Image (cartoon, coloured by chain):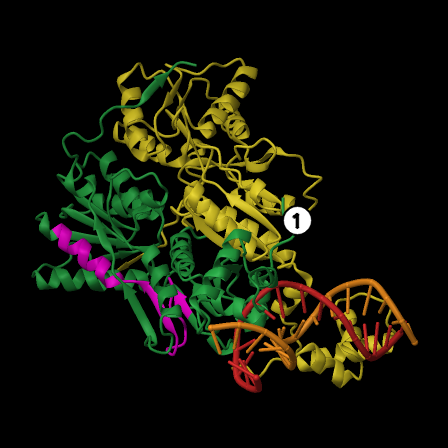
Chain colours: A green, B yellow, C red, D orange
DNA sequence: CTGAAAGCGCTTACAG
DNA sequence: CTGAAAGCGCTTACAG
């Protein structure tokens, strides 16, 4: 389909001016007479002139490109962050160069070389949560680097991550609001700072209300549905003195939900459940079954891109926390009247 | 911490040759005496010479970059495809330029301009399943375009997507293998080709075994957990003459699972359940609870990249189907002895 | 086997 | 307000 592309000098020639002047006009700047300007703009429009970005990058030494690093193992939580960042970058005419790497030093070294060779103007490193700090690559690049969905090992770096304490605050406040006072917490590994932050927020809000955690305290495990199943079984074997379970994520909440219902526990009447992550919505199949805290991952990505492009030297190093939001569902609010109309199809085949 | 970068002419000077010769050597080609070659390579290594990619792209007119388009709304299923493509591209020294767009014509027009301005050498369009055909942008680009996780509206385009019939085959065969004969199928909308393909595969394999679907046939609905809950409730209200449920995805399977267990149905003893997508593994929290068919999304992305780079004119237009794989879990195999050791921690706080 | 030279299409001081 | 010229760092026929 491509005719040979129109160049700046084509435009200049046809407009009867020099390339310098044409360049100046098309980049919006400089003192140029209105008539000349208009003539050039008209010709450019008529020829559908598209500047050769490769030539421009070369001439300016800037690629108008941001490198985005993501972990090779596909954690779906990185996706919204990635798209949030891409969207914010796109708005500023920046392109997104994606690299997926294993976060070991050797692979990182390779990718840093590639980023340098391509002269990226900045880098966003997307992590995989707070279980491990992210290797800092800032010292091996001369352009700004921001870390997202994870925290850099170096305190001199800027990291953006969901506000885990706020997750705990929102969940606790919601459960208090619906009158629950005997709350237990089932979550992931005690070594994962995401779990720890949520516990902290939970305790802060409960503490203010003069309420303590019910039962044996926090049940740490892993992040799987299977752990939710097992944790709920244990709770059922105990004194059953609880009216709400705050789960560290939606997978655990699903496991808990399955197990409690199987035991005849009514949800939310007997026990309310809150999860975290809003997974059903991430899967594009929102069902409102489980009340959850949405960690707003797109905003994390957008914020990271914003810090990168905004005023890199102005943004304070350290960890920036993005606010999250509670998404009410049936596991705390019950079924709303009128919901779940039976509009499905039955079909013989 | 960047010193001024080393240029090709620095290398040439220090090696006592011309830039032409240095260029030839460093690009691996040409007739050059072994001594000269070695001298240049040594100097390049010593100076840690990294060619300026921007200059090279400009000189050659090729950007060594592939544009990857993905839908703006973050469907997590696109993530593994994206990473698979990026990984295959990276292996060939190609970079991945990511654009997320709404798939409407106007937004597509904009992004096509950007892709052209940046002189991408090819494009992968990542779709969002088979519910709608993808707009074809091939005619507005002079470089090859491949469609993944979706099918282009144009039969002249090459599309790569998971093999939906094989999903049905595998699920059916697995259920037959474990002795089930009264199988029902609960799936998504009848308008979604992914659902339709799976139904077709299911019927083919059951047909060969002389088994028909149990009950009222295929239950079409949506892809949500909520639909799984409602479908299972209806089945429980019926004659209960079924010993297996093949669910169109894992969300539906989870809803079905919750509901059956709540009703005291034993899984898999009374009813076996199979889902699709291997979501728990995509979430990096595999739990083995539900037998599922993994659609191998990373392979879809890799295949798309492969067609793009391989021999674009050799690859036949049309739809290419990537094979998928069954991942057995407790919902058909029961708990394996020794599994689910109770290694979690209890912690007071 | 090696090198001088032109060229890729743009930007950017600088001079007029 | 406008233009001539140099330069960005590499590749690529071409001549020797």
Q: Which residue is mark 1?
A: B309
Q: Position of residue B51 (x, y in %)?
A: 66, 72
Give the left or right position of residue B46, taking residue A169 as reference: right
The correct choice, above or below, for B309 with respect to B254 in the image is below
Give the left or right position of residue A192, taking residue B96 as reference: left
Q: Out of A75 and A210, give the one closest to the viewer.
A: A75
Chain bearing mark 1? B
Q: Which residues are magenta?
A: A146-175
Q: Position of residue A81 (x, y in %)?
A: 38, 56
Q: Which residue shows up at 38% across the image and 46% down it?
A: B73
Residue A171: tell me if it is visible: yes
Q: Position of residue B240 (x, y in %)?
A: 32, 17
Q: Out of A191 and A307, give the one closest to the viewer.
A: A307
The correct choice, above or below, for A22 with respect to B125 in the image is below
Q: Out of A75 and B234, give the one closest to the viewer.
A: A75
Instruction: Name the image quarter holding residue B218.
Output: top left
Q: Position of residue B334 (x, y in %)?
A: 42, 34
Residue A116: tell me if it is visible: no
Q: Residues within 10 Å of mark 1 (few under 14, many from 20)?
A: some
């Amino acid at each position: 389909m491509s005719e040979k592309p129109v160049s700046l000098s084509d435009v200049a020639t046809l407009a009867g001016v020099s390339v310098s002047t044409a360049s100046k006009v098309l980049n919006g700047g400089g003192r140029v007479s209105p008539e000349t300007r208009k003539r050039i703009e008209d010709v450019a429009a008529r020829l559908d002139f598209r500047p050769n970005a490769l030539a421009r990058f070369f001439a300016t030494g800037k690629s108008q490109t941001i490198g985005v690093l993501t972990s090779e193992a596909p954690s779906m939580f990185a996706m919204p962050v990635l798209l949030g960042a891409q969207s914010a970058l796109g708005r500023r005419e920046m392109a997104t160069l994606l690299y997926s790497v294993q976060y070991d030093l050797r692979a990182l070294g390779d990718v840093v070389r590639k980023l340098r060779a391509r002269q990226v103007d900045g880098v966003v490193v997307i992590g995989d949560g707070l279980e491990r700090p992210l290797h800092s690559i800032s010292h091996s690049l001369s352009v700004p680097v921001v870390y997202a969905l994870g925290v850099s090992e170096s305190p001199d770096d800027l990291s953006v991550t969901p506000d885990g304490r706020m997750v705990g605050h929102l969940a606790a406040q919601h459960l208090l609001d619906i009158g629950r006072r005997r709350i237990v917490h089932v979550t992931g590994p005690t070594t994962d700072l995401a779990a720890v932050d949520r516990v902290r927020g939970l305790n802060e809000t409960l503490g203010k209300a003069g309420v303590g955690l019910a039962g044996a305290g926090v049940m740490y495990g892993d992040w799987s549905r299977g752990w939710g199943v097992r944790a709920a079984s244990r709770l059922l074997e105990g004194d059953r003195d609880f009216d709400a379970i705050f789960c560290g994520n939606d997978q655990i909440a699903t496991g808990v939900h399955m197990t409690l219902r199987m035991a005849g526990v009514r949800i939310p009447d007997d026990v309310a459940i809150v999860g975290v992550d809003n997974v059903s919505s991430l899967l594009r199949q929102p069902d409102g079954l489980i009340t959850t805290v949405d960690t707003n991952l797109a905003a994390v990505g957008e914020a990271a891109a914003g810090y990168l492009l905004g005023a890199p030297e102005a943004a304070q190093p350290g960890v920036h926390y993005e606010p999250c939001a509670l998404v009410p569902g049936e596991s705390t609010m019950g079924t709303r009247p009128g919901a779940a109309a039976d509009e499905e199809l039955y079909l013989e085949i």
